[in-house]
Amino acid sequence: MNNNDLEIVKKKLIRIIQCGFEINFPDTSETIWEYKLHGDSIGLNANDLLYLFFDIEKQFNIRIPQEDILTGRFMTMKGICEIIMEQQNISRESA
């Protein structure tokens, strides 16, 4: 995996959130990646997070491990990007 892969994942994740939840990000600076998805900054509720979970699994053809939910990695865009990159890497290695 390289930086180009990460940029593709970031752009696709932003598109999923913008289209699915009608959220527009004024910019995609590095700070946005640290915001909690359910906080005041982005404002997704529990149902939104569930839909996002399934959208990500479908769009990226991955399975998000339960431990990533329980440890809170799924709560920021940065954490989600890391999960996606890891799961895509695991899929490539097992293919």
Image: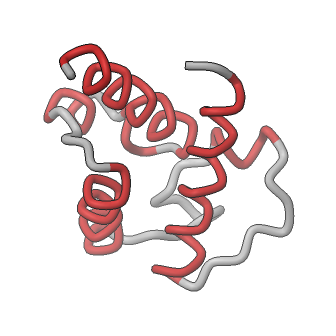
Image quadrant in which you'd find residue 94: top left
Quarter the C terminus occupies:
top left
- Toward the left, the furthest residue is 66
Q: What x and y, as percent, mark residue 20? A: 46, 80
Q: Relative to 35, is 45 above or below?
A: below
Residue in the image at 57% along x and 36% along y: 78
38 on left or right of 67? right
95 on left or right of 43? left
Q: What x and y, as percent, mark residue 86? A: 38, 23
Q: Relative to 52, is 7 above or below?
A: above
Quarter the N terminus occupies:
top right
Residue in the image at 28% along x and 70% along y: 51
Q: Relative to 54, is 71 above or below?
A: above
- Toward the bottom, the furthest residue is 22
Give whichever of 88, 35 is nearer the camera. 88
Residue in the image at 18% along x and 32% along y: 65
Q: What x and y, as percent, mark residue 58? A: 27, 60
Image label count: 0
Image quadrant in which you'd find residue 6: top right
50 on left or right of 84? left
90 on left or right of 66? right
Q: Relative to 79, is 36 above or below?
A: below
